[in-house]
Image (tube, helix red, strand yellow):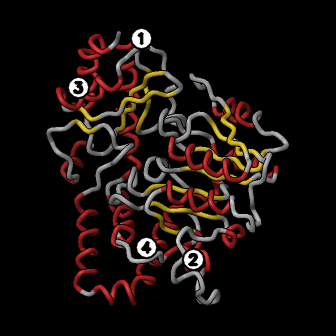
């Protein structure tokens, strides 16, 4: 795995263990991105005015094939937050055929990304619906137990299920396929935040069964920053009006997919980042990414064991790939000064890793990507051994 370090642009003096927040893009993919930017500057009218739709269609086709769905069922967004905001705003429209009403419930977990929690609380204030956090206490045990615990939160008022595929604060992989299957049978809409899934775990959205699924390409898939996607089941696409009304809004519906034309062009923006996605997919295919993921998983597992032995804190999930792959969250001692720990890790030990407070419990979240090796893991564990006694009151 360490032989892939040279393909990335990271500062070699940093032990970068925070790919989950802002991952690094391989140099080859970054060069592809810059070539497309240069192409725009050489002949902007030709590329943006005449070729953009064709080029974006080719890029979406490559992404859709990677995701196991049709090309016209996927559209690009700059990030998953924007994609979910588009969906959520449509659920608040008075004329929407799929509309939240007073008394309706959106069922989620208490492991969700903060920006999404804020989005749904905003929508609920404007619709009278309720955002219901189903507690998923730690440690988790089995996926079957998770499904039963979560599903017990469904009531006659539940209309929407929203949950992460892989959680941001606790780095846990949730069994969303079974939740989606039950929801479909119960007539509930499923919206999955898969920001951390593409590139980190095998992903076939047709088999997964979510009604709507968003994922980031600039995280574990290693595309340049600012590219994500939304998949929408074909029969749901007509009610998803765009956040920005632009040239696609009154276009001929017979000319192309309405879903694509409504959302694809929202004024001038840098489409080069979207056009670089096929290069990211190709990079991972060329470098046997299944083996890379397996190596990262082994390093993550061993490092988690070392941290739990150091802190004496119990692990939050079994050491099995169905629960975590390339990144994990480990408990830290109570009363750990998280801000000081994070700052000193970076400033004094050159270790980049986020510290997180979840449900008033302190954690460190550790990511392993193709550019990491044993030296990075050792640097983190050794730094924690020295710092934790100093930052825990």
* Residue 222 placement (x, y as % from top left): 35, 55
Distance (Cα) linking label 3 and label 4: 42 Å
At 66% across and 48% down in the image, what residue appears? 125
Location of mark 3 (residue): 344
Mark earlier in primary sequence (3, 4): 4
Distance (Cα) linking label 3 and label 2: 47 Å
The quadrant of the picture occupied by the C terminus is: top left
- The reply to whether discs 3 and 2 touch (Cβ–Cβ < 8 Å) is no
Q: Nearer the viewer, residue 231 or 297?
A: 231
Distance (Cα) linking label 1 and label 4: 48 Å
Residue sitting farthest toward the right = 156
Kind of element beneath mark 3 = helix
Location of mark 2 (residue): 262
In which quarter of the view is residue 355 placed?
top left
Distance (Cα) linking label 2 and label 1: 53 Å
Mark earlier in primary sequence (3, 1): 1
Q: Which circle, 2 or 4, is nearer the viewer? A: 2
- The reply to whether discs 1 and 4 touch (Cβ–Cβ < 8 Å) is no
Kind of element beneath mark 4 = helix
The quadrant of the picture occupied by the N terminus is: top left
* Residue 103 placement (x, y as % from top left): 80, 45
At 41% across and 14% down in the image, what residue appears? 335
Mark earlier in primary sequence (2, 4): 4
């Amino acid at each position: 795995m360490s032989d892939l370090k040279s393909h990335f642009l990271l500062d070699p003096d940093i032990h970068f263990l925070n790919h989950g927040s802002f991952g690094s893009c391989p140099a080859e993919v970054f060069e592809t991105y810059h070539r497309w930017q240069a192409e725009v500057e050489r002949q902007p009218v030709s590329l943006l005015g005449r070729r953009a739709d064709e080029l974006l269609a080719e890029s979406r086709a490559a992404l859709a094939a990677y995701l196991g769905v049709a090309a016209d069922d996927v559209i690009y967004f700059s990030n998953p937050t924007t994609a979910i905001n588009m969906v959520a705003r449509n659920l608040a429209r008075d004329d929407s055929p799929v509309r939240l009403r007073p008394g309706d419930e959106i069922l989620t977990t208490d492991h969700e990304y903060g920006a999404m929690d804020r989005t749904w609380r905003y929508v609920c204030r404007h619709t009278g619906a309720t955002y219901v956090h189903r507690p998923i206490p730690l440690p988790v045990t089995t996926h079957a137990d998770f499904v039963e615990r979560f599903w017990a939160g469904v009531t006659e008022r539940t209309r929407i299920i929203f949950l992460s595929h892989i959680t941001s604060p606790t780095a846990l992989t949730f069994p969303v396929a079974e939740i989606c299957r039950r929801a479909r049978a119960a007539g509930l809409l499923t919206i999955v935040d898969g920001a951390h899934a593409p590139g980190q775990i095998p992903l076939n959205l047709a088999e997964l069964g979510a009604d709507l699924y968003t994922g980031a390409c600039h995280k574990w898939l290693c595309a340049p920053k600012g590219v994500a996607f939304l998949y929408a089941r074909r029969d749901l696409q007509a009610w998803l009006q765009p956040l920005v009304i632009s040239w696609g809004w009154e276009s001929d519906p017979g000319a192309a997919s309405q879903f694509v034309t409504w959302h694809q062009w929202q004024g001038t923006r840098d489409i080069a980042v979207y056009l670089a996605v096929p290069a990211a997919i190709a990079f991972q295919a060329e470098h046997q990414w299944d083996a890379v993921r397996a190596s990262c998983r082994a390093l993550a597992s061993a490092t988690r064991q070392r941290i739990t032995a150091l802190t004496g804190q119990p692990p939050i999930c079994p050491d099995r790939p169905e629960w975590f792959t390339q990144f994990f969250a480990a408990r830290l001692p109570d009363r750990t000064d998280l801000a000081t720990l994070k700052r000193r890790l970076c400033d004094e030990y050159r270790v980049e890793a986020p510290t997180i407070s979840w449900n008033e419990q302190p954690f460190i979240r550790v990511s392993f990507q193709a550019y990491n090796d044993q030296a990075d893991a050792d640097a983190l564990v050794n730094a924690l051994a020295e710092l934790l006694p100093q930052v825990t009151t």
